[in-house]
Amino acid sequence: MLRKLLLPALLLLTPAFTFAKINREVERSFTVRPGSEIKVDISGGSIKAEIVRGDTASLTLHQTFHTNDERDIAEILERYKITFEQQGDDVVLDIESAKSGGWFSGWSKKNRASFKVTLTCPDYVDLNLDTSGGSISVDGEVTGDLIADTSGGSINVTGGTGYLNLDTSGGSISVKRALGRVRADTSGGSIRINYVGPDVEDVNADTSGGSIKIGLDPDGSYDLYADTSGGRVTIDELAITPHKITRTHAEGEINGGGARVRADTSGGSITIYAADQ
């Protein structure tokens, strides 16, 4: 009985060790031109990009400091190597943490920082976006190359005529409009490409852990290859001249053949269907 009475009292007397968060933002703008590259490389946060008109790229670094004391911030920042600058025509935002870089050790897990990035830029710049702990999204069609790489989240892009190179180990990939060349690769989720245009160069979708859905323009000409080990292949409202077709495999030409469209999954179904713009 005494033990039952003492336990609630002890819980009331135990201090609650909670640590507040201090948020700060650093925003910078840069003049860019066709051929410029924006490279963002962070560990542990999301990256969100929006395509806008003009010749200016604006980047905001959102910093969250896991402490309740403003005096800790300078010390916390010493544990990260942050590069945020223009190098020639290119813009670089790179954050190297003590955990991954190895040049600092013995720091407290509670007094640390986390980062995420939002940016706006014209469609013609090349985007190279890399994070190990969050999602990546690009709102608006691109004409430059887009590289998006994350180990811990999903990738969602509008698409465009530029080369889309999308890679994640821990989430799904979604593309609204593929009009140029696409490589989409994930180990832990599904792939959805809503619309593939008739002038597309190449589409390659590969996943080990989910389904694949690709919408093709019914007037486009494609060489199709679809294969699954863990589901079935469905061709919906598209006429295919098959070289080989089974429950788990489809290979053939659409409208006489043309751009290669390849879909490969080990853990789900594949659906290839007719899609409007």
Image (cartoon, grey):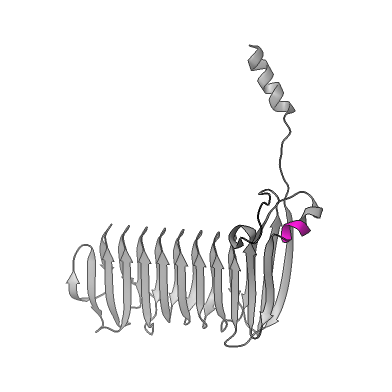
Going 48% across and 81% down the picture, which residue do you hit?
162
Q: Is residue 239 left or right of residue 33?
A: left
Q: Is residue 152 left or right of residue 226?
A: right
Residue 34 spot, x, y in % from top left: 58, 88
Furthest residue toward bottom? 34
Furthest residue toward right? 71
Of residue 271 and residue 148, the one placed in the foreground of this image is 148
Residue 189 spot, x, y in % from top left: 41, 59
Residue 21 spot, x, y in % from top left: 72, 51
Q: Dividing the image into 4 quarters, which one contains the C terminus?
A: bottom left
Question: Can residue 275 be seen in this snapshot?
Answer: no
Going 32% across and 69% down the picture, which residue do you hit?
263
Residue 159 higher or lower than 88, as above or below: above
| Picture quadrant where residue 84 is located | bottom right
Question: Can residue 23 be seen in this snapshot?
Answer: yes
Residue 23 spot, x, y in % from top left: 73, 57
Q: Please count the marks in the image.
A: 0
Going 36% across and 67% down the picture, which residue do you hit?
206
Going 64% across and 79% down the picture, which residue do you hit?
91
Residue 136 higher or lower than 19, as above or below: below
Q: Dividing the image into 4 quarters, which one contains the N terminus?
A: top right
Magenta region: 74-78
Q: Is residue 185 left or right of residue 99?
A: left
Q: Is residue 118 magenta?
A: no
| Picture quadrant where residue 203 is located | bottom left
Magenta span: chief secondary structure: helix
